[in-house]
Amino acid sequence: MVKILKIGDWMSKSVTTITKEKTVYEAAKLMDELNIGSLPVVEKGVPIGIVTERDIIRRAVAKDKDIHKTKINEIMTKDPVTVDDDTSILEVSRIMSEHNFRRVMVVKKGKLLGIVTAKDIINITST
């Protein structure tokens, strides 16, 4: 019998989040301190967006916005695609490929549980 690997067993469970009211500077500083490339944006534990290094560069810095005043809400990717924790790794991989994502948030009953990255998928499938 083939065991279906579920993403909830492999995701990163320690996820730092941010709120939409924080500034781009605060997000960049936090990402730098933690050496991470993205921050889920949450309200009451529910992901409403994600902000990435690319968002900061393209939607703030390259547009000459004041990173000390610009709020995350203005540059984040809204309404992010998420997956349930019982989604198969194969399905998560397909979703990431289809949408050209490098990371996907994992939820249970709409609440953020973790995050999975393309690197995670590569590591999982090579074991």
Image (cartoon, helix red, strand yellow):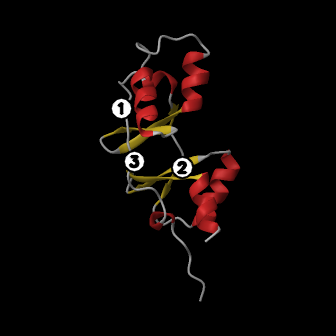
Instruction: Give, as a three-letter code, the residue at label 1.
Output: Thr
**Sequence order check, earlier mark of 1 and 2:** 1
Image mark for residue 15: 3
Q: Nearer the viewer, mark 3 or mark 2?
A: 3
Image mark for residue 50: none
Which residue lies under the disc numbered 1? 19
- Residue 49, given in percent of the width and then of the height, sits at 47, 36
Q: Residues within 10 Å of mark 1 (few under 14, many from 20)?
A: many
The front one of 17 and 73 is 17
Q: Residues within 10 Å of mark 3 (few under 14, many from 20)?
A: some
Q: Secondary structure at mark 1?
A: loop
Q: Residue at point 42% right, 27% down?
A: 29
The front one of 106 and 29 is 29
Q: Residues within 10 Å of mark 2 (few under 14, many from 20)?
A: many
Compared to residue 22, the image places residue 110 above or below, namely below
Q: Residue at point 44% right, 16% down?
A: 70
Q: Secondary structure at mark 3?
A: loop
**Sequence order check, earlier mark of 3 and 2:** 3
Compared to residue 31, the image places residue 23 above or below, namely above
Disc 1/disc 2 C-alpha distance (Å): 18 Å
Instruction: Give, as a three-letter code, the residue at label 2.
Output: Val
Disc 3/disc 2 C-alpha distance (Å): 12 Å
Instruction: Give, as a three-letter code, the residue at label 3.
Output: Val
Q: Quadrant of residue 91?
A: bottom right
Image mark for residue 104: 2
Disc 3/disc 1 C-alpha distance (Å): 13 Å
- Residue 94, given in percent of the width and then of the height, sits at 67, 58
